[in-house]
Image (cartoon, rainbow, N blue to C red):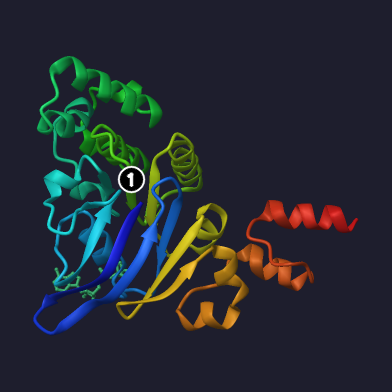
Amino acid sequence: MLTLNNISFSYQKNRFILKNISTNIDDTKITAIAGRNGSGKTTLTRLVMGLVHPNRGSMTLDDVDITKKEPYEMAQYIGYVFQNPDQQLFASTVFEEVAFAPRKLGCNEHTIKKRVEEALKITNLQDIIWEMPQVLSLGQKQRLSIACALAAKPKILILDEPTSGQDCRERTMLLRLMRKLNAQGLGIIMVTHDMDILAEHADKVIVINQGELAFDGTPLDLFSQKELTLKLGLELPEAVCISQELGLDICLTPMEIYAHLHKRG
Ligand SMILES: Nc1ncnc2c1ncn2[C@@H]1O[C@H](COP(=O)(O)OP(=O)(O)OP(=O)(O)O)[C@@H](O)[C@H]1O
């Protein structure tokens, strides 16, 4: 369990970007962080990664205090995949890119090779092990960034806008990968503006509004409160709108709509 206790943070003196955030994030589930542009979502994930430290409050992961931990210490607990993968790819081959974290963690060559092969297999990149990361497609780069994070064997993976800019095929592949990793026990935290993805895949949603925790619950709880959803700058997912138009109970996915209609006959 990742626990945030009353976290406040400012980049500049007296301008708090995050204010008194308290929440529990189950590291076996998929948690989405949503909110308007500039509300503080990425900053929250940067705090969890140790890239910045809170001015007030504390954070624990499985009861270990991680409030002051540095990024290199956090890498073995939490993997981070940037919105723009070019920000984190710099090696000359895919192999070397994925080997970076286990090498930094002091693994021997046999373990490094094993971890690289495992991470590339699950992300379906095993056939391009000797390619240059810079020449890959956006979707491949995104999956390579995930492979890099996985090679450090984290408990939780943070994905910042994982599907932005991707075509339909890559998007589907990435979401399937996310579900597969979660089913294998990896906790997922995703920052997303895509309410359809959030509705379909998240177990829990945290909404940040002007640096404050404005909602903490399930997607169904959130989207059942239409006024609140819109007030927080979020759109209603397609499936929610369609189910309302059809006079059904709120559905979060097209499959749920289909099941309700089938039941109704
Ligand atoms: N390095 C920084 N120095 C100063 N202010 C920053 C820095 N990074 C972000 N901010 C400010 O902090 C606030 C929150 O930014 P953050 O990137 O966390 O928001 P966000 O919710 O992730 O936004 P988006 O959805 O646009 O990615 C914004 O006002 C932003 O300008």
In the image, 52 versus 82, the foreground residue is 52
In the image, 42 versus 47, the foreground residue is 47
Above or below, 25 against 238 in this view is above
In the image, 257 versus 133, the foreground residue is 257
Above or below, 77 against 7 in this view is above
Q: Amino acid at mark 1?
A: Ile
- Location of residue 244 (image quadrant): bottom right
> How many marks do you count on the picture?
1
Q: Which residue is mark 1?
A: 156
Q: Quadrant of ligand 1?
A: bottom left
Pick the quarter of the image with the C terminus. Answer: bottom right
**Crowdedness of circle 1 by 10 Å Cα count: few (<14), some, many (20+)?**
many
- What's the residue at 69%, 67% (across, down)? 250
Label 1 C-beta lies within 8 Å of the nearest ligand 1 atom: no
Left or right for 148, reference 170: left
Left or right for 179, reference 132: right
Q: Residue 49: percent from the left, percent from the top? A: 21, 54
- What's the residue at 75%, 72% (across, down)? 245
- What's the residue at 16%, 68% (across, down)? 54
Left or right for 151, reference 12: right
Q: Residue 147: percent from the left, percent from the top? A: 30, 34
Outermost front residue? 63
- What's the residue at 43%, 37% (across, down)? 185
Q: Residue 34: percent from the left, percent from the top? A: 41, 67
Q: Secondary structure at mark 1?
A: strand
Outermost top residue? 110
